[in-house]
Image (cartoon, helix red, strand yellow):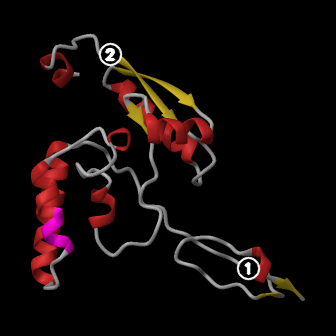
Amino acid sequence: RKLLAQAGYPNGFSVTMQATVGNFPNDKQAYEAVAAYLAKVGINVNFQVITLSDWLSRFYSGPRAPLWVEGLQYLPEMDSSKALGWYSCTQPPAGSHFCDRELDRVLNRASVQLNEKVRLALLREANKIFNTDAPAIPLWQLTDIWGLKGGITGWVKRPDAVLPLDTLTLR
């Protein structure tokens, strides 16, 4: 509350957050928790559930709510280059509301770096820029957990989390 007052919002403020629900386990509960955390410091969140088709339209064409929930790290990645790339100046204008030329410069250097130690140092630098500018707040990384009932065959775990049902058989 003290920081909000210093920023000129002594009584807090209201903001809209939009998200689809049902895409991730307990996603609605997580979004509601974020809204509750913000309410404790004086930020009133108007949480709006939108359809996936509305979300896609807004993702590619806008407009987006000031608080916009995205699940951008949907494939297994071994470093942060994919996630940070969503905040590149090279993203289509409707797809990005953030542009930092220094972040792009560092990410571009990291993308062609074959020396593991140098690449890691560049990605650490990119993460520092991202965390300082804070165009987004990463909340969690979803980990897929699979379980199969005995007698099911033909299942292969895919890195894209797609479950091809046409290969499954039940004995």
**Quadrant where the image shows the N terminus:** top left
Q: Position of residue 135 (x, y in %)?
A: 25, 42
Q: Residue at x 43, y 28 (%)?
A: 63
| Magenta residues, start to end | 107-111
Amino acid type shown at disc 1: Leu
Side of 77 where 155 appears, left or right: right
Side of 56 where 167 appears, left or right: right
Residue pointed to by mark 2: 13
Q: Quadrant of residue 56?
A: top right
Say which mark, if any, is on residue 148. Answer: 1
**Quadrant where the image shows the C terminus:** bottom right
Q: Quadrant of residue 65?
A: top left
Crowdedness of circle 2 by 10 Å Cα count: few (<14), some, many (20+)?
Answer: few
Crowdedness of circle 1 by 10 Å Cα count: few (<14), some, many (20+)?
Answer: few
Residue 136 visible: yes
- Of 142 and 52, nearer the camera is 52
Q: Quadrant of residue 76?
A: bottom left
Q: Is residue 171 above or below residue 148?
A: below
Instruction: Say whether disc 2 or disc 1 marks the residue closer to the N-terminus.
Output: 2
Q: Residue at x 46, y 41 (%)?
A: 59
Q: Residue at x 51, y 27 (%)?
A: 47
Amino acid type shown at disc 2: Phe
